[in-house]
């Protein structure tokens, strides 16, 4: 299957290319970047040296000959590209936020008018597999909502309040330098940011509601001095007390058929470079503390996008992304 990566110069694009190179059913035919048009891909993504023989091209979407396109472009840019790709007969996985939320919520959160809105499946396969399977267009979830929602989903119907406390690696901010990601400001440091206003909160609340829960949902992110990974601590406050064994059994049953959700002590090192989400919990009556760990660039972005591609195209869901983490 011919695949294009639109916006391939960043961390997410680089991870898509790395993972797709190992997919037995995929040929990468196009990697776009306006700024780097004409530059060999492996001069920018040097870890791919000798594995990819492509140069970046301008993103003339009408001229792309592919069966499926990944949109790894910034928020508010994808909406101007997705329609053309669909009209050209391609399937589309959008890794931006442009199609994750209802139109009115998106416009309020992102402060723009959505000019080409479509209602499409939200690509968290563990919860929405049936909608994603055979779809032509899927919205890939945000990195924080992926780890958070998987942590809370089994208990969401039993909760009245869910508080997410997430720690992320610096690659979540993208590869454009900024004061926030400047090495002297990050190294040997640990900070909270957007304490009550992070955009991903809307996705978390949307997914909790879709699970039939009326729980109030709160989220605060923190920046860790590591390259990649998200560790989320979900404080789930229950309507009725629950025993440890009962809560554990609930999670084991909920995820018993999910290849990419593992029941073990979460650590960033154990999931680094992989599409796995590791989960464990402790229960103290009305409060359950659930911890999850994902790689923000893989299960939180590119790996999950390929997981969605597999479902959309009728491939085995794990194909090309079965690899374990890179411990240590």
Image (tube, rainbow, N blue to C red):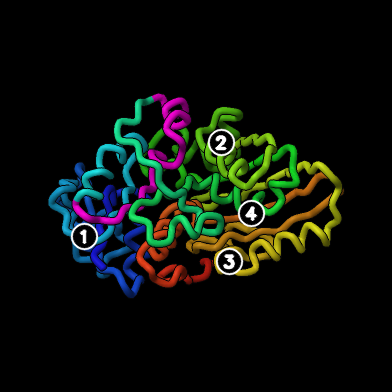
Q: Which residues are magenta?
A: 88-111
Q: Which residue is mark 2?
A: 201
Which SS class for mark 1?
loop
Which SS class for mark 3?
loop
Is residue 152 in the magenta section?
no
Mark nearer the N terminus (2 vs 4): 2
Q: Is residue 90 left or right of residue 219?
A: left
Mark nearer the N terminus (2 vs 3): 2
- Answer few, some or many: residues within 10 Å of disc 4's Cα (few below 14, many 20 plus, some between 14 and 19): many
Distance, label 1 to label 4, CA atoms, is 36 Å
Distance, label 4 to label 3, CA atoms, is 15 Å
Image quadrant holding the C terminus, namely: bottom right
Q: Which residue is mark 4?
A: 292
| Residue beneath the point at 66% across and 61% down | 254
Which SS class for mark 2?
helix
For the residues labelled 4 and 3, say whether their Cβ atoms are less than 8 Å apart: no
Foreground disc of the pair 4, 3:
3
Mark nearer the N terminus (1 vs 4): 1
| Residue beneath the point at 33% across and 55% down | 136
- Answer few, some or many: residues within 10 Å of disc 1's Cα (few below 14, many 20 plus, some between 14 and 19): many
């Amino acid at each position: 299957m011919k695949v294009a990566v639109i916006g391939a110069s960043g961390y997410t694009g680089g991870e898509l290319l790395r993972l797709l190179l190992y997919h037995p059913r995929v040929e990468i035919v196009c990697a776009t970047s306006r700024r780097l048009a004409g530059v060999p891909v492996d001069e920018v993504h040097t870890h791919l040296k000798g594995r990819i023989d492509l140069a970046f091209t301008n993103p003339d979407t009408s001229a792309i000959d592919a069966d499926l396109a990944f949109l790894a472009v910034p928020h508010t840019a994808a909406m101007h590209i997705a329609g053309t790709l669909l009209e050209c007969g391609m399937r589309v996985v959008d890794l931006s936020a442009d199609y994750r939320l209802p139109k009115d919520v998106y416009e309020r959160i992102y402060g723009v008018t959505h000019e080409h809105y479509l209602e499409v499946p939200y690509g968290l396969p563990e919860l929405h597999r049936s909608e994603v399977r055979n779809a032509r267009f899927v919205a890939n979830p945000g990195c924080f909502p992926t780890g958070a929602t998987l942590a809370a989903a089994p208990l969401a119907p039993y909760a009245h309040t869910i508080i997410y406390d997430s720690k992320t690696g610096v690659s979540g901010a993208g590869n454009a330098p900024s004061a926030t990601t400047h090495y002297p400001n990050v190294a040997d440091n640990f900070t909270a940011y957007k304490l009550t206003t992070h955009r991903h909160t809307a996705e978390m609340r949307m997914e909790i509601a879709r699970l039939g829960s009326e729980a109030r949902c709160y989220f605060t992110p923190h920046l860790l001095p590591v390259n990649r990974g998200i560790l989320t601590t979900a404080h789930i406050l229950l309507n009725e007390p629950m025993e440890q064994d009962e809560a554990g059994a609930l999670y084991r049953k909920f995820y018993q058929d999910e290849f990419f959700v593992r029941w073990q002590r979460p650590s960033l090192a154990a999931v680094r470079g992989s599409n796995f989400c590791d989960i464990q919990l402790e229960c103290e009556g009305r409060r359950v503390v659930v911890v999850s760990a994902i790689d923000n660039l893989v299960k939180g972005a590119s790996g999950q996008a390929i997981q969605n591609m597999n479902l959309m195209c009728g491939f085995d869901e794990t194909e090309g992304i079965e690899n374990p983490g890179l411990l240590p």
